[in-house]
C-alpha cells in the first residue's frame, strides 16, 4: 500500500466513515409545528424538532442547515393502505415519505396515489423524522 492510498483516509472523521459504511447520512429533519427556526429552542439556542401526526393537512416543516421549509402532509388511502406525502408550501410537487428505518425516511418525488384519508386517519404520532435523501428546495 502506498502513501497516496492511505493519506485520503486520514482526512475522514469517524462519523464520515460510519456514514460511508452505511450510506445513511441525514441531510435534514421533518418536524411538527414549533420545531423550525421561529419555533422552540433548546438551552443552546438550537431549534428543537418536534413530532407530528400522520393526518391529512398536518403542518410539517423540513429543517436543514439552519433553513426551514414549511410544508403540509397529505395522507391518501387506497384499499386500506395509507401513504403520506409531504408538499412544500407554494410548490406543486409532493414527496412520499418512504420508511428508511427507525425515525428515518427518504423523500421521493412521485405522483400521489389514492384518495384523501378522512377523519384524521390514520393519526399515528411520529417522532421527528431524519431525512436521508433531501431534494433541493
Image (cartoon, grey):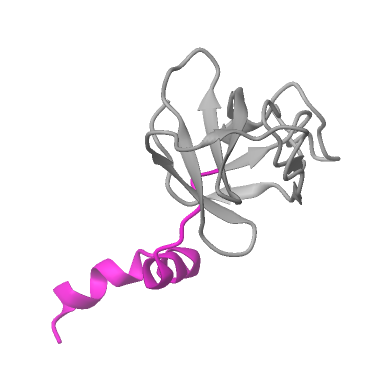
Image quadrant containing the N terminus: bottom left
* Residue 52 found in image quarter: top right
Q: Of all residues shown, which one is farthest toward the top?
A: 90
Q: Quadrant of residue 57?
A: top right
- Horizontal placement of 20 versus 25: left or right? left
Q: Is residue 54 above or below residue 92?
A: below
Instruction: Specify whether residue 89 is painted magenta.
Output: no
Residue visible at 55% across and 49% down in the picture:
79
What's the magenta region?
1-28
- Point out the residue furthest to the bottom here: 1
Whether residue 90 is situated above or below residue 63 in the rendered picture: above
Locate residue 41, reporting x and y percent: 81, 33
Residue plotted at (60% across, 43% down)? 29
68 over 82 or under it: above or below: above
Report x, y in % for residue 122: 72, 45
Q: Nearer the viewer, residue 107 or 40?
A: 107
As rendered, which of 2 and 96 lies closer to the eye?
A: 96
Looking at this rendering, what residue extends furthest in the front direction? 79
Residue 109 relative to residue 5: left or right: right
Whether 23 is among the magenta residues is yes
Residue drawn 45% across and 61% down?
Answer: 24
Which residue corresponds to the image point at 77% horizontal and 33% vertical from the top-left?
119
Q: Nearer the viewer, residue 90 or 82?
A: 82
Q: Position of residue 56 (x, y in %)?
A: 67, 31
Amino acid at each position: 500500500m502506498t502513501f497516496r492510498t492511505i493519506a485520503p483516509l486520514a482526512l475522514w472523521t469517524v462519523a464520515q466513515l460510519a456514514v460511508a459504511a452505511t450510506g445513511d447520512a441525514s441531510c435534514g429533519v421533518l418536524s411538527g409545528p414549533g420545531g423550525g427556526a421561529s419555533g422552540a429552542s433548546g438551552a443552546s439556542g438550537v431549534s428543537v424538532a418536534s413530532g407530528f401526526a400522520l393526518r391529512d393537512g398536518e403542518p410539517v416543516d423540513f429543517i436543514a442547515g439552519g433553513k426551514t421549509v414549511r410544508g403540509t402532509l397529505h395522507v391518501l388511502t387506497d384499499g386500506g393502505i395509507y401513504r403520506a406525502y409531504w408538499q412544500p408550501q407554494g410548490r406543486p410537487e409532493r414527496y412520499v415519505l418512504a420508511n428508511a428505518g427507525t425515525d428515518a425516511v427518504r423523500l421521493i418525488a412521485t405522483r400521489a396515489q389514492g384518495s384523501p384519508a378522512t377523519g384524521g386517519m390514520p393519526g399515528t404520532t411520529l417522532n421527528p423524522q431524519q431525512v436521508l435523501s433531501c431534494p433541493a428546495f
